Each structure stands twice: as structure tokens, then as C-alpha cells.
């Protein structure tokens, strides 16, 4: 069989425990409750038990969760339009879009060898208008997160953890998130804990957790599920205390998530096995991304760094292998281009990074096939 006729190997392929998932969804359909409440409450409670975080609110996407995190902190802390949040250029654009939605200024700091924010670069960007740091755990890697958390405490800055890739990541044995003022997880279809879409926003502070529930439901002080299950003649009555968004999650997606959560640790362990195959079979000349000290990653991605990246990608495609790029330096995009050149390490990584296929339907033999193809492509590119 020629390389081009082999079965395609894709970066991601979502998979679900279908019968188990349908049983959870059926419970929603049978009781007639598919929206906010019922399974969303169950999922939130299951997530706090699993992570050890004190609070969790299920929303319709991680992007919505990040926007809510920024909106709540801006309102609570009295941030002004134009105030600054230090962030990374090596991320999906929603990380930085949410800052613009709230009329804040993203200030890009550079990345380290882990492709996460470098504490020294963060410190060099702090000004009198800096209010927070947005740390992205790329691929499930914690990088130098403890040092970033310590820096934020010392400088009086809020720490927002974009943990879209970090469902199941542990740092020194504990699930990530306790280091931050607010942590946001993603349950998009290709993430380690897949639904169709969804996210969890986890504030450390109980008051802010109560606030975010109003912000995600149009500023209404009592959601429909809470009112339906309360006593008294005025269950229909609620107040609207401020404007907000319609960002809440629904019970159907929470039902899918509950099943995925039961299997998350085993699924992540399988991802780490595939990563170990790559680690053992890729040529030494191919750049690896080190895992942060004390980190057991979710292993959402397995990134490598290669020269002549675009030629390597085309060579892999010719062999029916379709990796990804995570991520393009955001300052390459027109709307963030004014910051181009400020983060040379991120720019260099962006030009060389490839995310190799990694998902539950990938076999170890598939991973060896990918490694062989990468090795060959790098040698000839």
C-alpha cells in the first residue's frame, strides 16, 4: 500500500460512549428538562468533586466562560476601559478577543520553552494599568504556572487560567485551578472531555461564583430551574439586577459531559501513552516541548518544533496524515498586528510548531506511522 492510499490519520477524532451517553440524555428527555438545571447542576457538582475546586458553573463554551471571567472581574474590581491584561500571543484567538469585548488592552508577553507565558517576560510588561494575567496551559502543560501565580500575588494582579486544554491536568498531584482567581475549562467536541460544546468557569470566591451565574443568565437573580424547584406562591417572580449574557449551559450537553468525566483519567492516560510512543520514536533532532515541573498533563496536544514546517506539513498530508498548528502567533493577524515583533520566542515557535495526531481512536501503531512520516519529512524538507 502506498503512503497516499493508507487510511487517513487526523489530528482529532471525537469519540463517545454512545449507549452510556444516550442513557444520560434520555433522563433529560423523559423528565422534559433539557435546559439550564437538572443535569447542569449535577455536572457542576461532579466537576467540583473531581477537581477539588470550590465552585463551578457550566456555560455554553469556554469562550463564554472567559468572557464572563473578564466581565465579572472588571465589574467587581472597578477596572476601567483601556486597562491592561497581560496575555500570550500563542493561543486561540478567543483568549484575546474576550479582552477586546470588554474594552481592555491585551499586552502580549513572550513564552518559554513550555510554550506558556514566561514569568520574566510578564514582569517586564507590568505597568500601572496592569490588572491581570491570562495564563494559557497550552496542550495541558502547566509550564511555570506556580511562578506566575506567585508573581501575581506579589504584584496584586488577578490570575485568570485559560485551562481549555487542561481537563485532568494535575500539578504536584492536585488538579489545576487552585492557583488562579478564576479558571475556565473547555468541553468542546475535540477536547479531552468532549461534549458538542461547553465550558466550566470556576471562581475561587463564592461571591464571584454567585455573580457569574447572574451574568450568564441576563442579569436575572434566580434562574428558571431554581424558581421551579422553590416553594411559595411567587416562584415566577425574579429581579434583573444588571445586564448580562445568555451564556448558560444546557442539560443535554451536561449529560454528555457527565459520561466523559467518568472516563477522563483513563482517557488522559491513554493520551500520555501515545505521547510516550512519539517521544520514543521521533528523531532526536525534532524539537520537543518540555512538560512543566510536577505536571501530569491532560496531553490534549503533542506539539513538536521543526524547521521548514510548511514543507513538512505538506509531506505529511501526501502520506494521508493531517496534523495541526497550535498556534499561529496572534500578532500575525491583522487585528493584533500592532504588537508584532514584541514576542520573538512566540514568533519562532509559531513558525515551527506542529501538533501531531492524538485522540482515543489512534492506535500506538498509528502513532509509530506518524513518527516515521515526520522523521522522513524532516530529513528531506
Image (cartoon, helix red, strand yellow):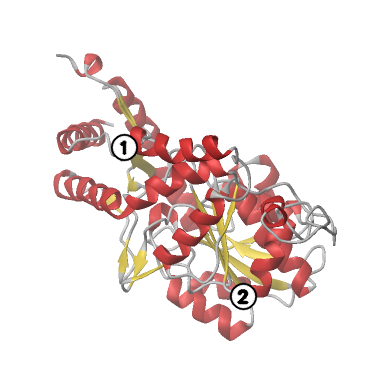
260 lies above or below 219? above
Q: Can I make out residue 199 in this image?
A: yes
Mark carried by residue 282:
none
Q: In the rendered image, which residue does mark 1 sit on?
A: 357
Residue 213 position, x and y percent, is 68, 60
Residue 68 position, x and y percent, is 68, 57
Closer to the camera: disc 1 or disc 2? 2
Circle 1 Cα neighbour tier, 10 Å, few/some/many (<14 / 14–19 / ≥20) = many
- Between 140 and 255, which is closer to the camera in this rendering? 255
Residue 304 in the figure: left or right of residue 73: left
Say which residue appears at 43% left-offset and 39% top-offset: 190
Residue 30 position, x and y percent, is 52, 36
- Between 362 and 49, which is closer to the camera in this rendering? 49
Circle 2 Cα neighbour tier, 10 Å, few/some/many (<14 / 14–19 / ≥20) = few
Residue 177 position, x and y percent, is 48, 68
> How far apart, in angstroms, are the residues tagged by discs 1 and 2?
38 Å
What element does badge 1 sit on?
A: loop
Mark carried by residue 205:
2
Total number of numbered labels? 2
Residue 357 in the figure: left or right of residue 197: left
Q: Quadrant of residue 175?
A: bottom left
Say which residue appears at 67% left-offset and 70% top-offset: 208
Say which residue appears at 38% left-offset and 60% top-offset: 141
151 lies above or below 294? below
What element does badge 2 sit on?
A: loop
Amino acid at each position: 500500500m502506498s503512503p497516499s492510499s493508507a487510511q487517513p490519520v487526523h489530528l482529532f477524532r471525537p469519540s463517545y460512549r454512545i449507549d452510556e451517553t444516550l442513557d444520560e440524555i434520555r433522563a433529560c428527555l423523559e423528565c422534559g428538562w433539557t435546559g439550564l438545571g437538572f443535569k447542569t447542576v449535577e455536572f457542576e457538582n461532579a466537576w467540583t468533586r473531581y477537581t477539588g475546586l470550590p465552585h463551578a458553573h457550566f456555560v455554553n463554551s469556554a469562550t463564554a466562560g472567559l468572557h464572563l471571567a473578564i466581565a465579572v472581574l472588571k465589574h467587581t474590581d472597578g477596572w476601567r476601559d483601556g486597562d491592561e491584561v497581560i496575555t500570550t500571543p500563542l493561543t486561540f484567538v478567543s483568549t484575546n478577543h474576550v479582552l477586546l469585548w470588554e474594552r481592555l488592552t491585551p499586552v502580549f508577553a513572550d513564552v518559554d520553552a513550555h510554550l506558556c507565558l514566561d514569568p520574566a517576560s510578564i514582569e517586564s510588561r507590568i505597568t500601572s494599568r496592569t490588572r491581570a494575567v491570562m495564563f494559557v496551559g497550552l496542550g495541558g502543560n502547566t509550564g511555570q504556572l506556580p511562578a506566575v501565580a506567585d508573581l501575581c500575588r506579589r504584584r496584586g494582579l488577578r490570575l485568570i487560567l485559560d485551562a481549555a486544554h487542561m481537563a485532568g491536568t494535575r500539578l504536584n498531584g492536585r488538579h489545576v485551578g487552585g492557583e488562579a482567581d478564576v479558571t475556565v475549562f473547555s468541553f468542546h467536541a475535540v477536547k479531552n472531555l468532549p461534549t458538542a460544546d461547553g465550558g466550566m468557569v470556576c471562581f475561587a470566591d463564592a461571591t464571584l461564583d454567585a455573580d457569574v451565574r447572574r451574568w450568564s443568565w441576563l442579569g436575572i437573580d434566580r434562574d428558571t430551574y431554581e424558581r421551579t424547584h422553590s416553594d411559595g406562591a411567587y416562584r415566577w417572580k425574579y429581579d434583573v439586577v444588571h445586564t448580562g449574557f445568555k451564556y448558560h449551559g444546557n442539560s443535554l450537553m451536561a449529560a454528555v459531559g457527565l459520561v466523559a468525566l467518568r472516563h477522563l483519567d483513563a482517557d488522559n492516560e491513554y493520551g500520555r501513552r501515545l505521547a510516550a510512543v512519539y517521544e520514543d520514536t521521533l528523531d532526536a533532532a525534532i524539537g520537543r516541548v518540555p512538560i512543566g515541573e510536577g505536571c501530569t498533563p491532560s496531553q490534549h496536544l503533542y506539539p513538536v518544533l521543526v524547521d521548514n514546517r510548511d514543507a513538512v506539513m505538506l509531506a505529511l498530508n501526501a502520506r494521508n496524515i493531517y496534523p495541526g498548528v497550535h498556534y499561529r502567533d496572534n500578532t500575525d493577524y491583522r487585528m493584533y498586528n500592532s504588537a508584532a515583533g514584541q514576542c520573538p520566542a512566540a514568533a519562532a515557535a509559531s513558525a515551527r510548531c506542529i501538533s501531531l495526531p492524538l485522540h482515543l481512536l489512534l492506535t500506538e501503531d498509528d502513532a509509530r506511522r506518524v513518527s516515521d512520516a515526520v522523521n522522513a519529512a524532516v530529513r528531506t524538507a
